[in-house]
Amino acid sequence: MKNTALSQTHESLGAKMVSFAGFNMPVSYEGVNIEHDTVRKGVGVFDVSHMGEFLIEGPHALALIQKVTSNDASVLSVGRAQYSCLPNETGGIVDDLIVYRIKDETYLLVVNASNIDKDWNHIAKYNEKIGAVMRNLSDDYSLLAIQGPKAIEAMQPLTSVDLTGIKFYNFVVADFAGIDYVIISATGYTGSGGFEIYCKNSEVQQVWDRVFEAGKAFDIKPIGLAARDTLRLEMGYCLYGNDIDDSTSPLEAGLGWITKFSKDFVNSEALAREKEKGVSRKLIAFELNERGIPRKGYDIVDDQGNEIGKVTSGTMSPSLGTGIGLGYVPTEFSNIETVIHVRIRKNLIPATVVKLPFYKGL
């Protein structure tokens, strides 16, 4: 396993450590419900330094990004970011990612830890004909997500930048926690506000210490990957390897909004035909109508007990107190308020298809 620059810090804090995407990562400290509640109501800090970072530079940088990603990066101004995905040649998804425009001809791609090598090789293959400058910075940089409704107030003393001015999917390069140049980005995956800090591995311990010092008055807590998963699921955000993968189309996954056919990208013609024809299955969100916890891999069935799909992500929502999940079903079962069933052990638990997000800031 690889360690992040903070792995020993997590262990010293009593974190339960697990192997995740080849990294030694904290899954929980005090328990998922306590940590989840901390982010929804206060401020919590995630070490997500396992994520990958690719720098794409030069006069051909935009051309490469336009070719390999589904969204339209040409609309990005410096200081803006966008959610996107890397389509593969067979209609599926290599990975989902965030694209940051750092300078006129410099872009940062942030990818999932489990896909760093796969993504790099995929992008490099298309770059052979385009010729952008590619640098893999994944082993050199750390990433902290400081999330929650009190995050901005707690962290404002650590920077000269007005944190309230960084709107969702915007970022700045500025001073923070005594470090002159970090990226402060509002691209969190929890739905509770806050921001992320990109800095060098050699700087992250100082940032971590200063963040927790500044957050003492706000009862700041370290947060593990388990709560990260329940938080993102309450928002309906896809998790690669669960809800999207090499076999799922972005259109099936409800990611048509980041699939822009105004440009040519990998497999765009085939995806355009799929859009015109209509997909045969869709990723739905559902809430259980009775007590139960849906888990990944559980059967989704119709009212006759016939299997129509599988749960891709599921949990007992800490915020809502009910079982929630995502899963693929035939399109005819995807309409809002459709009743389906989830097989939990030997019981068929009724569930209702709902509109995302599950959590609406209650």
Image: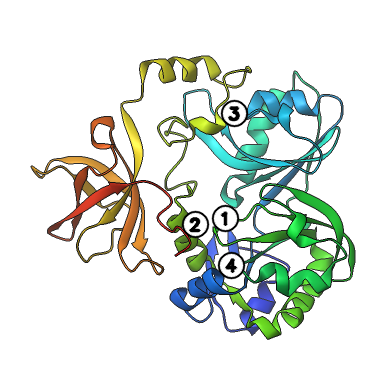
Mark 2–mark 4 Cα distance, whole angstroms, equals: 18 Å
Residue at horizontal 76 percent and vertical 82 percent from the top: 213
The disc placed on residue 70 is 3
Mark 1–mark 2 Cα distance, whole angstroms, equals: 6 Å
Q: Position of residue 20 (x, y in %)?
A: 54, 60
Residue at horizontal 81 percent and vertical 52 percent from the top: 172
Residue at horizontal 48 percent and vertical 17 percent from the top: 272
**Which marked residue is nearer to the observer: mark 3 or mark 4?**
3
Mark 1 highlights which residue? 189
Secondary structure beneath dot 4 equals: strand
Secondary structure beneath dot 2 equals: helix
**Which marked residue is nearer to the observer: mark 1 or mark 4?**
1
- In the rendered structure, which amino acid carries the disc numbered 2? Arg
Q: Position of residue 217 (x, y in %)?
A: 69, 85
Secondary structure beneath dot 3 equals: loop
Work out which quarter of the rendered image holds the C terminus and state it.
bottom left
Q: Residues within 10 Å of mark 2 (few under 14, many from 20)?
A: some
Earlier-in-chain disc, 3 versus 2 = 3
What is the total number of numbered labels drawn onto the structure image?
A: 4
Q: Position of residue 117 (x, y in %)?
A: 64, 42
Mark 4 highlights which residue? 25
Mark 3–mark 1 Cα distance, whole angstroms, equals: 20 Å
Nearest to the observer: residue 72 or residue 13: 72
Q: Quadrant of residue 159?
A: bottom right
In the current view of this chain or complex, which residue is farthest to the right? 180
- In the rendered structure, which amino acid carries the disc numbered 4? Met
The disc placed on residue 342 is none
Work out which quarter of the rendered image holds the N terminus and state it.
bottom right
Nearest to the observer: residue 239 or residue 72: 72
